[in-house]
Image (cartoon, helix red, strand yellow):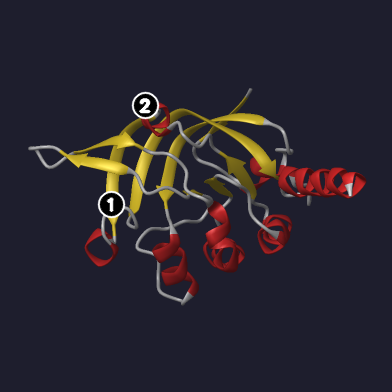
Amino acid sequence: MIQLEYPFNKEKVRELKVGDMVLITGKLFTGRDAIHKYLHEGNPSPVNLENQIIYHCGPVVLEKDDGSYEVKAAGPTTSIREEPYQWEVMRDHGIVGVIGKGGMGPKTLEGNQTYGCVYFHAIGGAAQVLAERIMSVDNVYLKEKFGSPEAIWELSVEGFPVVVTMDAHGNSLHEGVEKSSREKLNERM
């Protein structure tokens, strides 16, 4: 198990390879469809994303009486929806990692190589378990504009479990599984 601790940097991330199991400790910023489209359109990010990790997640967040927040569920959302935008967000904002589920496509894989980024897979269906790895909600951005699930939530995590499924060297576990599945299907035809 590899420990990836904040502050993150491209050199450390470039060392990661497909199949590496990683525990992330530090900051994560959520971002789903509305945020990716917003950033893709050239709007400024309300937070500096340089050397940060974006988590494709619309967390279920409870606002407490004292105004603080507690994350009740934080499972990954399907990442392929961000494929049209992700490489540009890598380029324009300098992120080093993306967390989601289901993998991404060739544009993101090329962006990973060009900009020194990796795609981490988080376990779908484990939203409550993953929420237990969130130690605090440190801020929220664009909630009024996009609503709670689509906002950028700034989270502090400890031992957040992920697997590298697309690395900065052009390797993609998703591409390999698809190729192998296609070959097996063709054998049966």
Name the one closer to the observer, 120 or 78: 78
Q: Which residue type does callout 1 highlight? A: Val
Left or right: 124, with 176 as reference point: left
Name the one closer to the observer, 112 or 12: 112
Residue 90: where, in percent of width, then height? Answer: 58, 61
Label 1, residues with CA under 10 Å away: few <14, some 14-19, many ≥20: some
Q: Determine whether 164 is above or below 92 in the image.
A: above
Q: Determine whether 108 is above or below 130 in the image.
A: below
Instruction: Name the residue furthest bottom.
Output: 41
Left or right: 7, with 134 as reference point: right
User: Where, by quadrant of the figure, is residue 60 drawn?
Assistant: top left
What residue is pinned by disc 1?
Answer: 140
Q: Which residue type does callout 2 highlight? A: Glu
Residue 43: where, in percent of width, then height? Answer: 41, 74
Name the one closer to the observer, 184 or 76: 184
Residue 180: where, in percent of width, then height? Answer: 83, 43
Instruction: Name the residue furthest front.
Output: 189
Q: Residue at x 55, y 42 (%)?
A: 8
What residue is pinned by disc 2?
Answer: 132
Q: Residue at x 35, y 46 (%)?
A: 154
User: Separation of disc 1 and disc 2 at Cα?
Assistant: 19 Å
Count how many numbered circles sit on residues in the image: 2
Q: Determine whether 36 is above or below 117 in the image.
A: below
